[in-house]
């Protein structure tokens, strides 16, 4: 996994705040990649939600 620049993280968080469904739609594209492990949709969403929670906590500290 490559590091992600902070401006991209902030843009994704803002997009999620405006429309959470847009993040779900973009995860469908990631899952369809041949290299991506086959995970259930719910477990994938749980992982994304946990990551977003951690990112929001980090952003709120700054």
Image (spheres, rainbow, N blue to C red):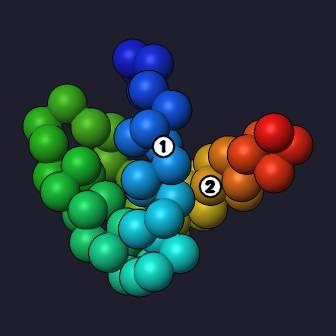
Question: Could you say where residue 53 lies in the image, as x and y percent from the top left?
Answer: 72, 57
Q: Which residue is drawn at 41% across and 53% down?
A: 11
Quarter of the rendering occupied by the N terminus: top left
In the displayed structure image, the side of residue 39 where residue 59 appears, left or right:
right
Label whose residue precedes the other's in the sequence (1 or 2): 1
Asked where in the image residue 36 lies, by quadrant, the reply is: top left
Residue 44 on image: x %, y %: 47, 58
Report the front residue among 15 and 27.
15
Tell me the residue at 52%/59% (across/down): 13
Q: Residue 9 carries which label?
A: 1
Q: Residues within 10 Å of mark 1 (few under 14, many from 20)?
A: some
Callout 1: helix, strand or loop?
helix
User: Real-space Cα distance between discs 1 and 2?
Assistant: 9 Å
Please, is residue 38 above or below residue 23 in the view?
above
Residue at horizontal 41%, vertical 68%? Answer: 15
Q: In this view, does 37 lie to the left or right of 61?
A: left
Residue at coordinates 48% horizontally, 65% vertically from top-left? 14
Left or right of 9, for residue 38: left
Is residue 54 visible to us here?
Answer: no
Helix, strand or loop under label 2: helix
Q: Which of 46 and 8 is in front in this view?
A: 8
Q: Which mark is residue 52?
A: 2
Q: Position of residue 39 (x, y in %)?
A: 40, 53
Vertical position of residue 39 compared to residue 9: above or below: below
Tag 1 near tag 2, CB within 8 Å? no
């Amino acid at each position: 996994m490559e590091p992600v620049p902070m401006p991209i993280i902030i843009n994704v968080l803002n997009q999620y705040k405006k429309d959470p469904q847009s993040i779900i739609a973009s995860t469908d594209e990631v899952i369809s990649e041949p290299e991506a492990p086959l995970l259930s949709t719910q477990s994938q969403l749980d992982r994304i939600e946990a990551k977003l929670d951690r990112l929001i906590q980090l952003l709120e500290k700054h």
